[in-house]
């Protein structure tokens, strides 16, 4: 691989936004047919570097070459035309357009002066089949699951004849089966000579898919590993610049007192049926399963966000089956949703406003909000939950990890009776993950039952006292921590 000239080279790339330098003299080579993992904590500079390569951001200084010639794309279109494609971490699909229209927007196949819809749908279907995505290409994107939308983004990028693909957290919303489909596609692209820059916080998958690892820290390239076959701890310590203790804190010891009880719960839209379980005081209860198993729909129903067709929800022995999110919130049941940008925070608004919106009774009086109270209340919870930011900062100026902490902070400030966390660490770095695990552990230690939904099997195994496994909308089984492992969970999830 290194005997041939790289298809992409970066030398001394720097980037500043005003007085803040976010990249400092970064070098990078990518060869044809290799996967280079670009790792680092949130804010390390990975996305900025990727945006420079893909033409979305201009560097302040430095040089790039592409296929041996000088390369300086001023727009994403210039990069795409050159053969460089990027799959963003954030979904960029248009919900009011069909899958096929989204995949070919701006470059529709034409015939006789009009859009050739039959050809567009044929090529869209072909692209989706390569990733094992079985959806009609004429279906609107709005209403599709996050995982399905992510696969459509990937299929969209692969319809370009790209010689280099940048994948930014491509599996963040995918389950194990979908991830393996993607990995098989990546292996095929490698065999065809496509170079890949792969960004992910899931370090176990980096070991599986990457050929080399480049580590960024505080905007600088700090380490390169010529293999991905390394202990996860070695990679983590390179990312954070310090020795890391165990990622998951010790499991809490719950009491025997049952706080939350779900009996025969079924979704009105058919996503799941006849689910029953109980959660004890101070217990962390995991929910696992493949994408489409009904995990998210289950916690949304418990939180009143989705309608319930059958069954009941009991809190401390009292029937509190919610008809709306307001019902659940008033009874102390809160949900931190899986998509923080669409459902968790209002990006153009400040941290203190985001925290205040869920706690009007604490920041105002008689229907009027006190700016002084909101500022004080937000500052207290920013400190309490370790948010790296100030109250006046807008949420869109923060890293993904700190946005997630704001979502958690705004709900935990209500001192809830039950906490539901759907994909609490999706798309955030290992340092922020560790902080969130400490928050989860602290809640359980204080006696609060916590339900954690995660498509990261290592995570759900690491944090949970017990695990409910869902399969195709039904309850496949509940495993105690002592009997739960990769094999036992997947056997139930695929049963």
Image (cartoon, rainbow, N blue to C red):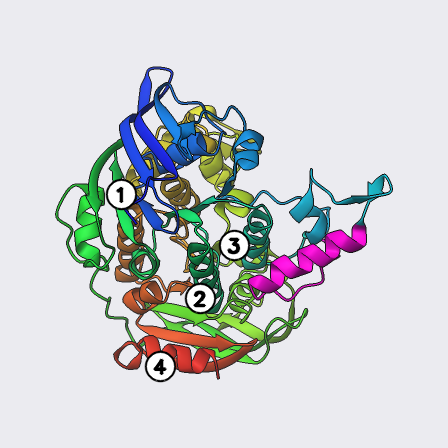
Q: Residues within 10 Å of mark 1 (few under 14, many from 20)?
A: many
Picture disc at residue 52: none
Q: Mark 2 points at which residue?
A: 180
Query: Mark 3 sits on what residue?
Result: 329
Q: Specify which label sits upstream in the sequence, 4 or 3.
A: 3
Name the element at disc 3.
Answer: helix
Give the labeled residue for mark 1.
Answer: 214
Label 3 or label 1, whichever lies nearer to me, is: 1
- Looking at the image, the residue that sits furthest to the top is 19
How far is the residue under mark 1 from the one under mark 2? 23 Å
Where does label 4 land, which residue?
488
Left or right of 330? Residue 252 is left
Tell me the distance, in whole angstroms, between the alpha carbons under discs 2 and 4: 19 Å
Q: What element carries label 2?
A: helix
Q: Is mark 1 on a helix, strand or loop?
A: strand
Q: In this view, does 377 lie above or below 416?
A: above
Q: Find residue 73 and report its horizontal and vertical position in percent.
A: 49, 26
Give the Cα distance between marks 4 and 3.
35 Å
**Which callout, 3 or 1, points at the residue further toward the start of the chain?**
1
Estimate how packed mark 4 is, as few (under 14), some (14 to 19) or many (20 or more) residues with alpha carbons within 10 Å: few
Question: Is residue 307 something one can see in this rendering?
Answer: yes
């Amino acid at each position: 691989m290194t005997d041939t000239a790289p298809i992409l080279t970066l030398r001394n790339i720097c980037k500043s936004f005003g007085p803040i330098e976010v990249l400092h003299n970064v070098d990078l080579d990518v060869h044809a047919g290799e996967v280079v993992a670009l790792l680092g904590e949130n804010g390390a500079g990975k996305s900025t570097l990727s945006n420079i390569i893909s033409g979305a951001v201009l560097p302040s200084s430095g040089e790039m070459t592409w296929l041996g010639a000088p390369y300086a794309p001023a727009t994403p279109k210039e990069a795409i035309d050159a053969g460089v494609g990027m799959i963003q971490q954030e979904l960029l699909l248009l919900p009011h357009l069909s899958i096929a229209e989204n995949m070919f927007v701006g470059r529709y196949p034409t015939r006789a002066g009009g859009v050739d819809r039959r050809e567009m749908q044929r090529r869209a279907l072909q692209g989706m089949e390569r990733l094992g995505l079985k959806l009609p290409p004429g279906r609107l994107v709005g209403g599709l699951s996050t995982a399905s939308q992510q696969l459509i983004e990937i299929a969209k990028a692969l319809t370009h004849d790209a010689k280099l693909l940048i994948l930014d957290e491509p599996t963040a919303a995918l389950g194990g089966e979908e991830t393996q489909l993607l990995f098989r596609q990546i292996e095929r692209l490698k065999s065809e000579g496509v170079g890949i820059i792969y960004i992910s916080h899931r370090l176990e998958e980096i070991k599986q898919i990457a050929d080399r690892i480049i580590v960024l820290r505080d905007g600088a390239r700090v380490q390169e590993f010529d293999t991905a076959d390394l202990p996860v701890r070695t990679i983590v310590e390179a990312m954070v610049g310090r020795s890391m203790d165990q990622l998951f804190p010790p499991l809490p010891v719950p009491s025997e007192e049952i706080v939350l009880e779900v009996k025969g719960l079924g979704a009105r839209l058919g996503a799941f049926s006849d689910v029953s379980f109980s959660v004890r005081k101070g217990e962390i209860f995991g929910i696992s399963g493949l994408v489409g198993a009904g995990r998210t729909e289950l916690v949304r129903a418990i939180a009143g966000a989705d309608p319930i067709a059958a069954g009941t929800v009991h809190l401390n022995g009292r029937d509190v089956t919610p008809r709306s999110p307001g019902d659940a919130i008033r009874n102390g049941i809160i949900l931190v949703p899986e998509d923080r940008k669409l459902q968790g925070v209002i990006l153009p608004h400040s941290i203190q406003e985001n925290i205040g919106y869920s706690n009007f009774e604490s920041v105002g009086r008689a229907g009027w909000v006190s700016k002084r109270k909101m500022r004080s209340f937000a500052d207290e919870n920013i400190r309490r939950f370790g948010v790296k930011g100030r109250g006046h900062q807008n949420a869109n100026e923060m890293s993904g990890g700190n946005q997630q902490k704001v979502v958690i902070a705004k709900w935990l400030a209500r001192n809830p009776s039950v906490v539901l966390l759907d994909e609490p660490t999706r798309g955030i770095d290992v340092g922020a993950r560790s902080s969130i695990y400490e928050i989860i552990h602290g809640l359980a230690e204080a006696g609060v039952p916590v339900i954690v939904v995660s498509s990261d099997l290592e995570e759900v195994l690491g944090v949970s006292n017990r695990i409910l496994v869902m399969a195709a909308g039904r309850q496949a089984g509940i495993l105690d921590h002592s009997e739960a492992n990769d094999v036992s969970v997947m056997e139930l999830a695929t049963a």
